[in-house]
Amino acid sequence: MIVASRAFSDAGRRRRERVESTDLEVAPHIDEDAECRIVSVAQARIHARRGPRVANGNFSSQGLPKFFSVPDDIRRHTIVTHHLVLGCREDAMDRRRLEGIGITHVLNTCKQLPNYHPDAFIYHKIPLMDAPDAPIMSCFEVAANFLQRVERVGGRCLVHCIAGSSRSVALAIVHLMVSHHVPLHVAFHHINRMRPQANPNEGFKLQLALLEVSVLGGSSVAGRDAGDAWFFYEWNTRKNAVPRLTERYGKAGSGDSAACMVQ
């Protein structure tokens, strides 16, 4: 009976994993008319506030994102670029605050939380658990495409999980690397400077480090000066075998968003 029960349990687990993996890779269906209306209203609100902005989500020629300054209260949302905002569950629940900062889209990276205001914002949910073996590489393309769309239509997206520390930060970094070729070292440390609680789990950090090698052709976090965040067993056993990015911040005067040399 115990063996049969375990077999049944294992079969159910594998079935759930297949369903969850499929969910991670499904692109959202977007009502373009609703999206256009929401973006127009939010742009008018942001313009009225006359706050700082980054045109078209672009990055400097040296590969340094034009990040905003650190908020006074780190428990609140963190505006990373004009189009990308990091936050937690409380931010996601607060419709008035989201409308006040011009949110148009929400990327919900948390399996446990619902989409709180589906009538007010354009949503995409990627049901991740904050576990080292959660497959963020299965959904990085869908996440990056969604955030690229936000930039393309001139919107602003809240990327959130429960604490705004691990899942949401990991997918925000994925977008910066994949869509804008910002080196991992730059993306991680600028976000961490602005949002000190930003701390993806080690499984996510390993996947980010390997993704950087795949996307940029080398690693910006394999050196001794990468910082304590990148000193952990699974990465330590691999990093000596990967090529290094010798210019983390790109070449001055280059037209590329983050031109990096590989050795």
Image: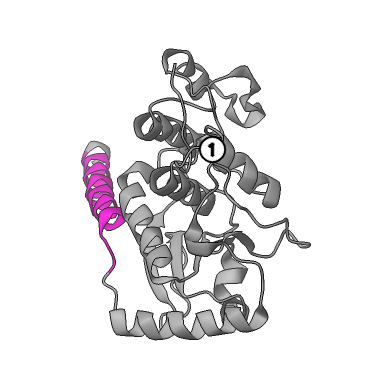
Relative to 37, say whether 190 is above or below: above
Decide if residue 189 is on the left or right side of residue 216: right
Q: Image quadrant for the C terminus? A: top left
Relative to 215, say whether 126 is above or below: below
Say which of 183 and 18 sits in front. 183
On whether residue 5 falls in the magenta region, the answer is: yes
Q: Is residue 196 visible?
A: no
Decide if residue 22 is on the left or right side of residue 207: left
Q: Image quadrant for the N terminus? A: top left
Farthest residue, direction right: 72
- Residue indicated by mark 1: 253
Q: Is residue 194 visible?
A: yes
Which quarter of the picture shows residue 107?
bottom left
Across and down, in percent, residue 165 comes to 59, 51
Across and down, in percent, residue 260 comes to 47, 29
* Figure disc tally: 1
User: Which kind of residue does numbered mark 1 sit on?
Assistant: Gly
Say which of 71 and 229 sits in front. 71
Q: Main secondary structure of the magenta part?
A: helix
Q: Which residues are magenta?
A: 4-28
Across and down, in percent, residue 194 comes to 68, 51
Say which of 200 and 215 sits in front. 215
On whether residue 3 falls in the magenta region, the answer is: no
Helix, strand or loop at mark 1: loop
Identify which residue is drawn at 65% across, 67% down. 52
Decide if residue 131 is on the left or right side of residue 71: left
